[in-house]
Image (cartoon, helix red, strand yellow):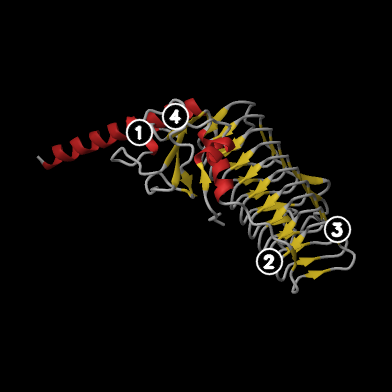
Amino acid sequence: MLNESQGSTVAALAGLLDLTPPSSLAQRVIHTLSDPRTAGAGQVAVLFDGRGLPREGTCEAELIVCSVACTLPPDLSARSLRVEDPGLAFVRLARHFYPEESPQGVHGSAVIDSSAQLGQHCSVGALAVIEAGAQLGEYTHIAAQALIGSGVRLGRGCRIGPGVRILPGSELGDAVWVESGSVIGGRGFGYLPPDRAGVRAAIPQVGGVRIGDGAHIGALTCIDRSTLGHTTIGAHARIDNLVQVAHNCEVGTGAVLVSQVGLAGSVRVGDGAVLAGQAGVADHRTIGKGAVLSARAAAFRDVPEGQVYGGVPARPHKQWLRQQAELARSSRTQSTYLSRNEDNHEH
């Protein structure tokens, strides 16, 4: 929600960014953070580089925050603050002008079992359900229509979005965010081969899910509980919307799974690894620490630590790029050959 109070002086904003502003700017009042293309009087805009400027090369913002290396026309430079990290500056300014709401209290329509334990300053939204034996750490927020299953444990300062289902056997650390509609701890997809009648018997999935401190889980993502033991998500992992993490997977600390990534059962993703959009990993494979799997890549074999892989099947990225270029050249050559043959036949 926009903080539309009296506004903040440039001097105050510079303090947030650990800067000392020019005296000519210090007492100007800024009311909002805005896009460089639409910013005007009383607004601050953050430029990540010169390409952030509108096409006409100007910006009407009262204040511009940009990197030390950013080249600006003199009139823009005169009303700018220079920072080492524009991204971090943007985050600080956004938090200042758009502070997160702090929900309080328990809505009258929430259903909370008498054996559930809620820490101090917890909040529970409308029609949320907290089942028997669940434990919520202090300052944790449960949004409307969320379900916290029996025996689930949530740490301090968690934010559980509307309609989230956190099912029995799940344990979340401190400051975990789970966005709208996600399901944590659903039954893993495990079946025996077909019997004589062609029926695949379900393998019991009796484990749980453990999510480390500070992890962020996007909307409509599913993290299945393990067959035995736990499916694990490491601390400060970043998982986007519409991601599938199957039973028994291990996702390392700080790993990133971008939208529509799919991990089959028992996949291991190393610390700091990045799986780009729609990448997939076959069961029992390992993506090494710090490795990168490019968009739409399909890993049927392990990806070594620190390597960048792409393509289907996934292979070293440079190799894949060379092969794609060769395929394109071959296709053009074939098209030219066929076109010439057609011309000859016509004559």
Q: Residue 151 shows which numbered tag? A: 3
Residue topped by disc 2:
144
**Nearer-the-camera pick, 340 or 104:** 104
Q: How far apart are marks 3 and 1 (CA)?
A: 56 Å
Does 41 appear above or below 144? Answer: above
Q: Nearer the viewer, mark 4 or mark 3?
A: 3
- Mark 2 or mark 3, which has the lower sequence index? 2
Q: Distance between the residues labelled 2 and 1?
A: 52 Å
Residue topped by disc 4:
321
Identify the image quadrant of residue 263.
Answer: top right
The amino acid on which the numbered mark 1 sits, given as a three-letter code, is: Ala
What is the secondary structure assignment of the residue under circle 1?
Answer: helix
Rendered location of residue 48, percent (x, y): 45, 35
Side of 11 where 119 appears, left or right: right
- Mark 2 or mark 4, which has the lower sequence index? 2
Q: Residue at x 37, y 35 (%)?
A: 51
Residue contact between numbered discs 4 and 1, judged by CB atoms under 8 Å:
no
**Nearer-the-camera pick, 99 or 139:** 99
Q: Residue 328 shows which numbered tag? A: 1
Please indicate, yes or no, whether residue 276 appears anywhere in the rendered image: no
Residue lying farthest to the right in this orientation: 115
**Nearer-the-camera pick, 303 or 119:** 119
- Quarter of the picture containing the C terminus is top left
Q: Residue at x 56, y 40 (%)?
A: 12
- Quarter of the picture containing the N terminus is bottom right
